């Protein structure tokens, strides 16, 4: 590799601001903030959503009820012009 053309690849702490969850990974991201983490002073990146706070990963994800939408449509408009009614 050529010297002085690659970004500094180092340990970085990512902190979820919604719940305080922190994790360390390696990154080239530039940041001005630092934090003391397990006896080391590391760069800090503040994030809004992580796997600890995202609704999909926490089980609070809402599932869309598509069958209910179809039934609501049929109640509103009936079976007028329905191909399934003509076939059945």
Image (spheres, helix red, strand yellow):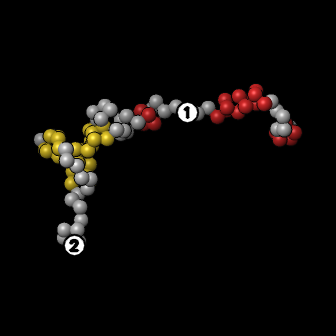
Image coordinates for residue 56, horizontal then vertical, percent: 45, 36
Residue drawn at x 26%, y 44% is: 45
**Mark 1 lies on residue:** 63
The residue most toward the bottom is: 2
Q: Quadrant of residue 76?
A: top right
Dot 2 or dot 1: first in sequence order is 2
- Badge number at residue 72: none
Where residue 25 sits in the image (x, y, percent)? Answer: 26, 48
Identify which residue, 62 or 31, lies in the foreground.
31
Mark 1 burial class by Cα count in 10 Å: few <14, some 14-19, many 20+: few
Residue at image x 19%, y 47%? 32
Mark 2 Cα-neighbour bin, 10 Å: few <14, some 14–19, many ≥20 = few
Q: Quadrant of residue 47?
A: top left
Tell me the residue that label 2 is attached to. 2
Specify the quadrant of the image occupied by residue 22: top left
Q: Position of residue 59 (x, y in %)?
A: 45, 31
Q: Quadrant of the N terminus?
A: bottom left
User: Is 9 drawn above or below residue 82 in the view shown?
Assistant: below
- The answer to whether 1 is drawn above or below residue 53 in the figure is below
Residue in view at x 44 percent, y 34 percent: 55
Tell me how far mark 2 sits from mark 1, CA to CA: 50 Å
| Residue 57 % position (x, y) | 42, 36
The C terminus - image quarter: top right
Residue drawn where x is 19% and y is 44% of the image:
33
């Amino acid at each position: 590799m050529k010297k002085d053309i690659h970004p500094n690849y180092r340990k970085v702490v990512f902190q979820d601001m919604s719940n305080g969850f922190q994790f360390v990974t390696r990154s080239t991201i530039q940041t001005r903030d630092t934090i003391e983490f397990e006896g080391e002073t590391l760069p800090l990146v503040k994030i809004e959503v992580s796997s600890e706070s995202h609704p999909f990963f926490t089980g609070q994800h809402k599932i869309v009820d598509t069958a209910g939408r179809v039934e609501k449509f049929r109640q509103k408009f009936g079976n007028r012009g329905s191909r399934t009614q003509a076939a059945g």
